[in-house]
Image (tube, grey):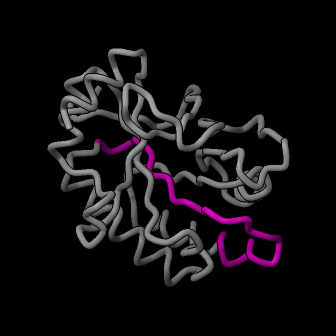
Amino acid sequence: TAATAQALAAVGYRVAARYLVPERYAWKRLTRAEADAITAAGMQIISVFETTADRPKGGATAGQTDGREALAEAQSIGQPAGSAIYFAVDWDAQPADYDAIEAYFWAAAAEIKGFVIGVYGSFAVVEEMARRIPGIRIWQTYAWSRGRNSDKAHLYQYQNGVKVAGHPVDLNEVYDGAGAWNTRGE
């Protein structure tokens, strides 16, 4: 809500990461009204697509579907071209998963033309996808990272389930080149 965005901005937060997912996930879906409220509070937005934690195991077929859905959502809420859409690898993925994950990301990237693709995941996942997919944006989570930090990260999630200004949030550091945006195109 506008009040939530204003409360978070008032205590110093400048970026809100929100789910860019289809309407069937309404409980967590970023809407145009919310994007406008975040923007009006003076904050930027990071978009992340995640329907299920291990969706990238579905490889290229899943990536194509998810990329298409992410593009439709980005366009419907006014996300400007050139900003990033992150796709989540939200489990302790192992090397045996990497080929499917890579195929997922290449297929998703082909669908979100005009936007920059990003990966959210553990140290091992983001390092591997950075090696395999040139130019991919990196959002590392501390989860499953076993104390290692990627020097390639554009975002770093370092704590989950914190209350800020009375609202539950996950805490992230945001670095240059993260691909944040707002509805004013700034």
* Residue 167: in magenta span: no
- Occupied quadrant, residue 92: bottom right
Q: Considering depth in this image, is 58 or 116 the residue closer to the camera?
A: 58
Q: Which residues are magenta?
A: 80-102
Q: Classify 102 as above or below 125.
A: below
- 79 on left or right of 85: left
Q: Nearer the viewer, residue 56 or 25?
A: 25
**Is residue 89 magenta-colored?**
yes
In terms of depth relative to the viewer, which is nearer, 121 or 137?
A: 121
Image quarter of residue 164: top left
Depth check, front residue: 10 or 173: 10
Across and down, in percent, residue 100 comes to: 67, 78
Q: Is residue 5 above or below residue 57?
A: above
x and y, in percent, of residue 39 in the image:
24, 29
Look at 41% across and 29% down and name the residue there.
15
Q: Position of residue 133 (x, y in %)?
A: 67, 58
Rendered location of residue 56, percent (x, y) = 58, 73
Q: How many marks?
A: 0
On the picture, is 35 further left or further right than 49?
A: left
Residue 103, quarter of the rendered image? bottom right
Relative to 158, 128 lies left or right: right
Residue at horizontal 42 percent and vertical 22 percent from the top: 13
Q: Which quadrant holds the N terminus?
A: top left
Q: Residue furthest left?
A: 33
State whether residue 23 is above or below residue 36.
Answer: below
Check the picture and name the quadrant holding the C terminus.
top left
Identity of the residue drawn at 49% across and 63% down:
109
Q: Residue at x 15, y 43 (%)?
A: 33
